[in-house]
Amino acid sequence: MKKTILLTLSIFLLINIIDAQEEEKKELKPALLVIDVQNAYVPWMDQSDKDMAFEYINAAIGLFEKYELPIIRIYHQDKEWGPELDSEGFKFAPEVKVKDDYPMIIKHYGNAFTKTGLDKLLKEKEINTVFLCGLSATGCVLATHVGANDNDYKVFMIENALLSPNAEHTDFIETIMSSVGFETLSVMIEYTQ
């Protein structure tokens, strides 16, 4: 009798442990953050990788559009030195194929989560994973990566879709951070469907 009770209790506990582990496994619910690819900042970046970075940014945008996944435009604006909100410098570079109807976040700090509505917007859309592209790999993209981790998101930089003032530094950041190539990104996104 005791063996039967212990066996039943063990099975019950095992089932509860398995159920708890299944609840912890979250379905991948991704969003793409296109960060600071603004006319005011692009000239400060190493231009050797610019064309390739814009090509990969646009490919990521196309992939997220194909699967109707959220794409969020992140803009940097300093209240003292600009760029002014209505200026050409504030706008995204024309080579980047973002649409005006994508949600827009304006930040005043490197980390796009600091004193913005980004976390609230992502939670409203039930997003748990963010993919980052844009600039600077060594500045705002890196800071936003840290901010995403701090806010319990899975976060990945998109390899070759990043720029910084020094291309070697961009390569280094892609190597040491959770960067994914476009093929891997495509498989991850297709897996969500």
Image: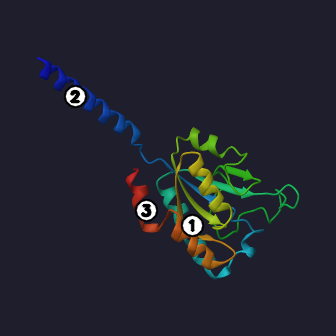
Residue 95 vertical position relative to residue 155 in the rendered view, above or below:
below
Find disc 1 in the rendering and name its residue. 58
Furthest residue to the bottom? 48
| Residue 104 placement (x, y as % from top left) | 68, 51
Circle number at residue 10: 2
Label 3: element kind: helix
Q: Earlier in the sequence, mark 1 or mark 2?
A: 2
Residue 156 to residue 123: above or below: below
Say what amino acid the circle numbered 3 marks.
Ser
Residue 149 drawn above or below residue 97: above
Cα gap from disc 3 to disc 1, whole angstroms = 13 Å
Work out whether mark 3 precedes mark 1 in sequence or the reverse, and give the earlier one.
1
Q: Report helix, strand or loop for mark 2.
A: helix
Residue 35 in view, yes or no: no
Q: Mark 3 points at which residue?
A: 186
**With respect to residue 145, does 136 lie above or below?**
below
Q: How is the image coloured?
A: rainbow
Residue count near mark 2 (Cα–Cα under 10 Å), binned few <14, some 14–19, many ≥20: few
Residue 95: mark in rendering: none
Mark in front: 2 vs 3: 2
The structure residue drawn at horizontal position 53% and vertical position 68%, both measured from the top left corner, is 176
The residue sitting at 74% across, 75% down in the picture is: 43
| Amino acid, disc 1 | Asn
Sequence-earlier tag: 2 or 3: 2
Q: Which of marks 3 and 1 is in front?
A: 3
Quarter of the view holding residue 32: bottom right
**Disc 1 residue crowd, few under 14, some 14–19, many 20+, Cα 10 Å:** some
Residue closer to the observer: 56 or 158: 158
Residue 81 or residue 50, whichever sits in front: 81
Q: Residue 110 placed where, x, y %?
A: 71, 57
Residue 148: x, y in percent? 59, 51
Q: Distance between the residues labelled 2 and 3?
A: 42 Å
